[in-house]
Amino acid sequence: MNTTTVPSSRIHPKKFTLWVAMASIVMMFAGFTSAYIVKMNEGSWLKFSLPKIFWLSTVVILASSLTLHLAGKAFKAREMMRYRQLITITAVLGLVFIVCQLTGFWQLEKDGIQLMGQRSNSAASYLLVITGMHMLHVLGGVIALIVLLAGVYSRKSKNYSPLPIELAGIYWHFVDVLWIYLFMFYLAVG
Amino acid sequence: MSHVAETQAAGVVAVHHDDHAHHEHHEHHETFITKYIFSQDHKMIAKQFLITGMFWAVLGGLMSVLFRFQLGYPEDAYPWLETILGKWAKGGRITPEAYYALVTTHGTVLVFFVLTAGLSGTFANFLIPLQVGARDMASPFLNMLSYWFFFIASIVMLSSLFVETGPFSGGWTAYPPLSALGDASPGSKTGMDLWIISMALFVVSSLLGGLNYIATILNMRTKGMSMTRLPLTIWALFFTAVLGVLSFPVLLSGFILLIFDRNFGTSFYLSDIFVNGVGALPNEGGSAILFQHLFWFLGHPEVYIILLPAMGMVSEILSVNSRKPIFGYIAMVGSLFAIAILAFLVWAHHMFVTGLNPLLGSIFVLLTLLIAVPSAIKVFNWLTTLWRGSIHFTPGMLFAIGFVSLFISGGLTGIWLGNSAIDIHLHDTYFVIAHFHIVMGVASMFGMFAGIYHWYPKMYGRYMNNTLGYMHFWITIAGAYMIFWPMHYEGLAGMPRRYYDYSIWESFKQFAELNRFISTVAMIVFAAQLLFLINFFYSIFKGRKVTSLNPWGSNTLEWTTPIRPGHGNWPGEIPEVHRWPYDYGKDGKEFIAQTTPVGEDESHH
């Protein structure tokens, strides 16, 4: 059954679905950050500086976007070996990003800024929840990359459709940009 | 219409044989499990949503009957209540905890499981691919997941009814601190954990569904089906999906913060609280009002998520059964669009009495009252569509007309409540209960019934029984008004909602008889719904068989499929569309299907 009887000039329905899903994710973070602003203006708001390692994680996620972009190019040039390597590097960078963020939380706790539990201030709790939700979205991207890799190694389907890598690319750049937004938001507003 | 049906009946036999020939490649792998359980066919998923929704409607309706017992007969004890509810009705009287749990679960279940999943889940799934001319959704797999997330959400919600401390009892809006503190009430313990897990799963289900609906409508339309040739059902379902996709994530963010407050000791919503038996809590600096903002940012669009599909189906059914084009198609689309935009800009009208800045309040009053404009356009267009039509009073048509009636009478009280000055008096009274039950609850229920009666022949290849349908309609509409009209009066007199027993209040003692009247009617109306259930399930197996492709003489594409379409909908090519769907009574023809090419001699196009 052919479910994709669309003219090729139109955007692929799956790609379109992804864009709508990203709009939906944006709304969730818009909800979080507006709650942050509302709460901040109500007082009893702890001021603290962001963990230094967040700068490193920013560099890491930017680098991962670059490697995934190159992976897409390699796929289109049919350099499958290079493609596999770049996807693997991207996934690892994604995990490194998550570890960096966790380290940032750990540093805050070490400096006596409680993220949750008794005596936690919601300024720190917001940082935890918003950043944590973003980390989950990155983790989702890592899982998508692993699925892509599995697809390359499976013998059953030799699929040369660029769609999966394009979808992964769009999503990955999206979570990258989302982090840049959140980081700027913390720096400018928090 | 019957001559049309008969001329087509002859052609049907041939089509039906054809259909088998073309269908072999779809059907040979289908087992019971892939066909009825983990189905990826949008029509089967629609039926799964519908029947799960009906299960919840019965349960949620039964809950309202139970708490109406308490409100109508507060002094009397009914031993049979103890038999079915056990410790929740000790001595035959529903306990306060059980009363609040019933009210809360009734609200949650009806708003989300019945009128969101059961209504838009059913008809978006069923009608979108059939009416836009697609073989299935953009992603049948995500679509299947959407149902199964709803199913798991249902199981979790259902299980919360059986935990020792009872289901959540703090109201369907789940405001903190009642929802954030396990020590606040029995229902706030395990019941609330299950409630929030269930609702989170439900949000995921809605998002997966909504993504698919939008992608299908925008990308999978058949040749010639431009956006301005879409039936209004599809436009309505489109805006519904957009509302859901943009507002449910905000609710989810509110829930995530709530989960942290409940389980990880954060203070997003909590501040300066003293709990009886526990003492002062360490939480400081949180804002309970913040949850209300996040909740109502979904909560108000949710009202339109419930109402728009009903509006769309009613527009279609009114036009088909009046044998007239819908009046003001573009105005109908424009007003849906206006409602969808305004839906996001009015949430704080639920919060006029929370200490909202009066200036901000007046802006929200203005925006709220603006909704009256597109609503009035819609009502006007429905009435002008009916005007001088040759109306076929099918049960579906009656429910569609009933919808318009309810939407008018419930919408008018919305103008009262939208004014912050009047709302200060009416807030949290029975006036509010009456308003939203009529305009959102019963009206959307009527839209759903209209849709079921109208598209039942397409769903099951059989008709529902008309006589039972008429009885169902007249008892329900008369009953709905008898239940909710008196509540306006009680509300104007200041009777607050959510009280357990009004007979002990000097000011509300006078309403004892009226409350008893409302409760009695509620029971009768609930019983009348059993007529519908019997009709529905009996007709699946024994209903009169549909013998013509297009029993209502309708223009839209779903009636060009075989009587019982297989997965893929059309056995051959998907038909091409040449015109809008409302060419009724044009140039002396009763109806002209969308697939008919525009002739040379047509008067206007």
Image (cartoon, coloured by chain):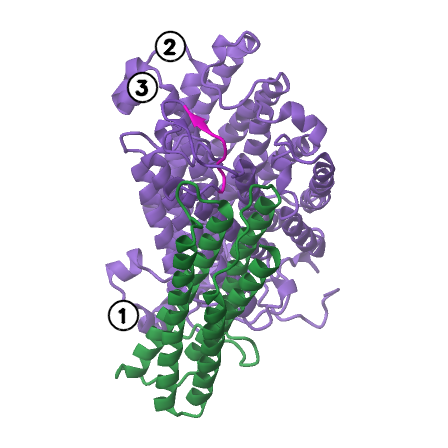
Chain colours: A green, B purple
Nearest the eye: B601 or B349: B349
Q: Residue type at mark 1: give it.
A: His
Residue that appears at 28% across and 62% down: B34
Q: Which residue bears the numbered disc 1?
A: B28
Nearest the eye: A84 or B466: A84
Q: Chain of mark 1?
A: B
Left or right, A130 with respect to A98, comes to right
Asked if labels 3 and 1 share a chain, the reply is yes
- Asked whether disc 3 touches disc 1, contact meaning CB atoms under 8 Å apart, the reply is no
**Residue A51 position within the rendered picture, expressed as x and y whole percent measured from the top left:** 47, 61
Q: Earlier in the sequence, mark 3 or mark 1?
A: 1
Asked if one can make out residue B137 in the rendered structure from this viewpoint, the answer is yes
For the residues labelled 3 and 1, the Cα–Cα distance comes to 53 Å
**Residue B455 position within the rendered picture, expressed as x and y whole percent measured from the top left:** 47, 50
Asked if one can make out residue B460 in the rendered structure from this viewpoint, the answer is no
Q: Nearer the viewer, mark 1 or mark 2?
A: 2
Q: Is residue B70 above or below residue B481?
A: above
Q: Which residue bears the numbered disc 3?
A: B89
- The single residue placed furthest to the front in the displayed view is A111
Q: Chain of mark 2?
A: B
Residue that appears at 25% across and 59% down: B33
Q: Residue type at mark 2: give it.
A: Asp
Q: Which residue bears the numbered disc 2?
A: B76
Locate residue B104: give its quadrant. Answer: top left
Answer few, some or many: residues within 10 Å of disc 3's Cα (few below 14, many 20 plus, some between 14 and 19): many
Magenta span contains residue B466: no
Q: Nearer the viewer, mark 2 or mark 3?
A: 3
Q: Is residue B488 above or below residue B178?
A: above
Residue range corresponding to the magenta coloring: B268-275
